[in-house]
Structures are given as C-alpha cells and as structure tokens.
Amino acid sequence: MKNYIIILLLSLSNLLFSQNSLSIQIGGALNLLSQTETVGLKPGANVSFTYQATLNNKIQMVFGLAYLQKGYLQISPITIDPFSSYMGSYENSIDIQYLRLPISVKIPLGNFRNGHYSFQIGAYGSYRMNATQRLLSDIQSTRDFTMNVHEVDWGTNGSFNVEFRLKDNLSCMGSFVFDAGLVDVIKYIPGSRNYGCGLMFGIQYHLYRVKLPLSN
C-alpha cells in the first residue's frame, strides 16, 4: 500500500510540476515606509530557505522559511518644561526579529541577458523571536522590548523581483516588496502593523534542482 501511495504522489507531481528547486538566500533589506512612524531607510538582515515548484505553464508555487528583521521609528511626545506647555518629542528605534513562513505564487514577466523579472503575491505567518528598543539620542539605552510586541503576525505580501544569474546555481537578486500585516505589532499602539514597502537584495544559491522526466 505504501508503494502505491508513493507512486501516486510522484505521478501527481509529474502532472503538476515540471521542475522544483531548493535554494538559500542571504541578504539585507531597507524598510522604506511603514504604517507606524516614518522609518527612513532602516536596514535589516534576512536569511531564507525557499522551495519552488514550477507548474507546466511556468508559474511557480513558492514555500519558504525565513529569518528577517523589521525596524520602526517610534516618535513619542514629552514635556520639556513642566512649568510651561512646551512639548517636545523623543525617538525610539525598535528592532524586531521574526521567523516567517511565506507561501506565494510567482509569475514570470520577462527575460533579459542572464536574468529575468517576476511578480510574486501570497500570504505569510510570522513568529516574533526577539525585539529591542533603543533611544536614538543615547546608544547605551538599548533594552529588551520583546513583551511589548505581539508574538504572532500574519498577513499578505507581494514583490517585484529581478534575478541575475552569476553561475549555474548562483544568482544575485533584488526585490521591491510590500507587506500588508493584519495584526498590531506593538501591543499598546493600535494600527502599528507590518504594513509598508521596502527593498530586499542578496545572493541566492540553489542547493538542488530537479527536472521531472515527463515535463514539457
């Protein structure tokens, strides 16, 4: 019975998919805009494992496991002089580390020499691993902020990707990404969602690629 199940799964994969691959991506990100306060080009890192299964019409299903950093700039009002009505503000840099599970559909848009363009749209679920807060005026003021950030985040996302092949299994890539989170990130700030756009860039290495024998 077990052998029949394996044969059935392989047959279905052969009908649906013409090629599949597993790759690792290492790079960075710039968060350009967020639904929280302005985040002027705040950098972060990302590392991900990605499995791509190509349909016969070249559309790909993409599954991943990613570590990424999201950053925000929180601006809070304070009273500078208690004997007057003058108000000032201070800025906190908030950095959050997530473990993300994305699933998406990748649609090719065109090719150029040694590279191609694509559009990707899907959904994600994230687990908050750690978070820190730092007063920008004092580099020594870093403190743990983990308990102030919701543990789970989910939403939809999309990206426009450019990939340039360096070698057979090695390529560099850049993406303009958009997140539309559905959960408040910071517990005491309503509307502080992972909602915004940014740039991602890095190196991708294909650990393996398999082309099924009956594919087109």
Image (tube, helix red, strand yellow):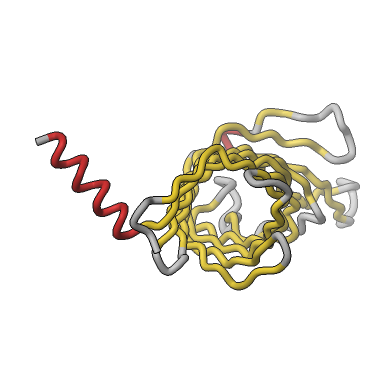
In the image, taking residue 192 as reference, residue 100 lies left or right, namely left
Q: Extreme bottom residue here?
A: 109
Residue at the spot 57% in from the left edge and 67% down from the top edge: 119
In the image, taking residue 62 as reference, residue 165 lies left or right, namely right
In the image, taking residue 42 as reference, residue 206 lies left or right, namely left
Q: 52 or 189: which is nearer to us? A: 52
Q: Quadrant of the N terminus?
A: top left
Residue 131 x %, y %:
64, 35
Q: 149 or 154: which is nearer to us? A: 154
Is 104 above or below relative to 25?
A: below
Residue at the spot 65% in from the left edge and 46% down from the top edge: 168
Residue at the spot 70% in from the left edge and 53% down from the top edge: 165
Visible residue check, residue 190: yes
Q: Quadrant of the C terminus?
A: bottom left
Is 23 above or below relative to 158?
A: above
Residue 124 x %, y %:
47, 52
Residue 24 x %, y %:
59, 39
